[in-house]
Amino acid sequence: MAGRGAAVPDSATVQDPADSPAPNLADRLSRAVVAHGDRAALHHRDRTVTWSELDAAVTATAAALAAEAPAATDGHPPRVAIALPNSPDFVVAYLAVLRAGLVAVPVNPGFTARELRHVLADSGATVLLCTGAVRDRVAGFAAELPALAAVHTELPTGGPAAPPAPARGGEDLAVLLYTSGTEGWPKGAMLPHRALAANHDQLDRITPPVVGPDDTVLLALPLFHAYGLNSGLGAVIHHGATGVLVDDLGDTGALDVIARHRVSVLVGVPSMFLAWAGADADTVAAATASVRVAVCGAAPLDPATAARFTEATGHPVHVGYGLTETAPVLTSTLVGGEPKPGSVGRPLPGVELRLVGPDGVDLWRDGATAPEDDGDDPFLVDPSPGTDPGQVVVRGANLFAGYWPDGRGGPDADGWWATGDVAYADDEGDLFLVDRLGELILVNGFNVYPHEVELVLDGHPGVAGSAVLGVPHPRTGETVRAYVVPAPGRPVSGEELLAHCARNLARFKCPTDVEFVDELPYSAIGKVRKTQLRPAPPARSTEVPDVH
């Protein structure tokens, strides 16, 4: 094996996080041990891990990793890939990598061999901590990964004693998170310690606090995703709260776990709130009796689902918006205090946000609307007062440092970064997402936002789910194709759905092709993977004549 990596510091010698504006998250672990070492840090199934126990396990694994990881040869610290489920082992592995001064590369343990090969090869990971199933998949191509020096299905411990290393924090790279790859191969977003810490500081400025040291937080989101990793686990470590790890939500969204551990902060995605809203109302109310805050992110939440949850529990659902590259939260309805149906709220304190039109002119910035246009545009996504849709462009300490390995695609020289998302702001300053810029459909030069069409389709009682995308058309450039999952027990035809769209949308926005599918391809956090949708056999589609 190649030379030694970074030496692990003894937890007692770590700098007080309060003295640093951008601490290493593992330093926060040390602070929690001093504050309440015997209190529960994690619950997982029938196991409870105290802060002191967690700290000891992290130190032991960090020492082993520091001794084992080959020295960096590319200007970056060694990378350690973590392909584990939501479990104490993931938490120990993640914090140990940070404590050892290495870079964590969280990986979906459900990845196929092809997907694993890309992430491991691209990141140049030298150590892989994983499940047995992942190890077996990797074995088939391990010879193609010369950088990979060790694969462990149990966390290594017992490294040799080493002097404390200089604390890593600030602009040092902490995590390499691979994006969902909506276009081509996933890219590694480089998140420094500064970005992870800044997002907690930004959220801490919301009143009342989203998470505090006395909270018990549901950690059911995948920890290999930015939302689960930093908004969930990171918040627990940052505040010294208690986390409840869930690796199987079951049919009722782990309501029994929520009730047993008296969870006070629900951090979820739409599919989780859908399960809770659809469960027995009395059961949901009893299980969520201790809940203080319920937040949802990662994908659009149907307002009807939020309303059913609120009716059953008495708790409003606060919605947030962010990206992997922003560590991850940018906006939240918690900022304004009251959730507004369909809105993703307002920018967090410390986040600057602009809506920029196609001509590069600001339509909205930090709550201020640009001068009114002539008002003659008949193609606005929403007729209510507010701005035209524009691309979301942001600046803040929580932004990433660009894509691996050279920082390309990161913030510009002034710190601004274009998200690729399109949104508008209403007259009260609340933001509403429209779509991804890359998913915009141009029909005869007119903008069609797929999400608007999907909302109309999903409003039909015969539709359980839908996804809309643009396909080439010889006359109009593109046309709208809809993929629809029929609702059980409610037969529906393509002609019926096309007529429904015609009653609710301008003609150029209406689908010209409806394809029925058994299910839509979803990512681990509930986003539809539109790149996996393919044209259906002719027998299963309903086409209409060109209406453009």
Image (cartoon, grey):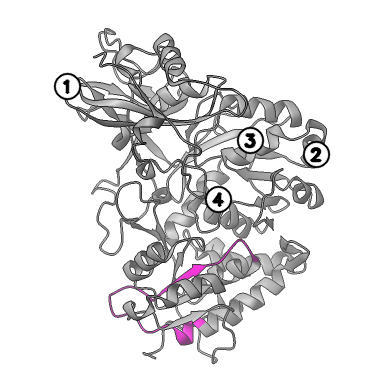
Q: Secondary structure at mark 2?
A: loop
Frontmost of labels 3 and 1 is: 1
Label 2 sits on residue: 289
In the image shown, does 486 or 355 lie closer to the viewer? 486
What residue lies at 50% left-to-right and 33% top-to-bottom?
300
Q: For mark 4, what is the residue?
A: 231
What's the amino acid at mark 2? Answer: Ala
Q: CA distance from mark 3 to mark 4?
A: 20 Å
Q: Position of residue 509 (x, y in %)?
A: 33, 18
Q: CA distance from mark 3 to mark 1?
A: 41 Å
State the separation of the CA atoms marked 1 and 4: 46 Å
- The x and y percentages for residue 163 are 50, 88
Tell me the magenta residue range: 65-87
How packed is label 3: few (under 14 Cα within 10 Å), some, or many (20 or more)? some
Q: Which mark is residue 177?
A: none
Q: Which mark is residue 274?
A: 3
| Residue matched to label 1 | 475
Indicate the quadrant where residue 392 lies. top left
Give how far across and how far down residue 536 sits, in percent: 36, 36
Q: Earlier in the sequence, mark 3 or mark 4?
A: 4
Quadrant holding the N terminus: bottom left
Residue flagged by tag 4: what amino acid is it? Ser
Left or right: residue 250 versus residue 170 is right
For badge 3, the amino acid type reads Leu
Is disc 2 in contact with disc 3, using a CB cutoff of under 8 Å? no
- Mark 3 lies on a secondary structure that is helix
**Is the residue marked by circle 1 packed among few (<14), some (14-19), or many (20+) residues within 10 Å?**
few
- Say whether disc 2 or disc 3 marks the residue closer to the N-terminus: 3
